[in-house]
Amino acid sequence: MASARRGLVALAILVFALTWAGCGSSGNSISDSQIISALNLTKTSTGYEMHGDPFCRIDDLLNDLSEVKQAQHQKGPGFVIAAPQGKAGVVAHPPFAPACKRKAQDALKKLVHPPKKNKKS
């Protein structure tokens, strides 16, 4: 009887954890294709290049806040370029041109905060 209760409690905890994890990321994730399009990335054998420039190399795409935070804490040569509030980002590979960093930041900002269309009456 006690083992059945423990099993039910464990099952309830598992269901709660899976439900919470699913709710936390739904609707807040930016797809790879959206990031690729916004930054004009081209797939290469080593990752991605912005505008075909090898000095604008991207190692990884970050689709949401949790991926951005996780990447910021990882050690390695790459560094994170993130959209406002970490809603999306990329891991850039040095050497990474300063102009590329500015372009990436602008594109990510526009991706998560698209310009509002003017209403015509």
Image (spheres, grey):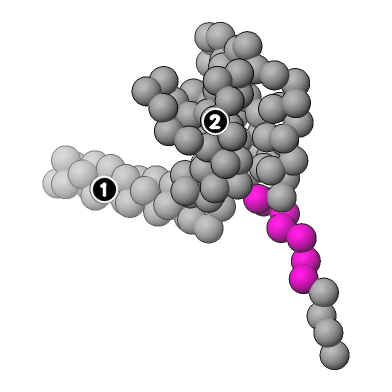
Is-magenta flag for residue 115?
yes
Q: Amino acid at mark 2?
A: Gly
Tell me if mark 2 has few (under 14), some (14-19) or many (20+) residues whose alpha carbon lies within 10 angstroms of its own.
Answer: some
Q: Amino acid at mark 1?
A: Leu
What's drawn in magenta, residue-wise?
111-117
**SS state under label 1:** helix
Image quadrant assignment for residue 97: top right
> Which one is in front, 19 or 72?
72
| Residue shown at the point (59%, 34%) measured from the top left | 51
- Please state if 112 lies on the left or on the right of 120 as rendered: left
- Please state if 59 lies on the left or on the right of 102 as rendered: left
- Please state if 81 lies on the left or on the right of 29 as rendered: right
| Residue shown at the point (85%, 90%) measured from the top left | 121
| Residue hosting label 1 | 11
> Which one is in front, 3 or 74?
74
| Residue hosting label 2 | 52
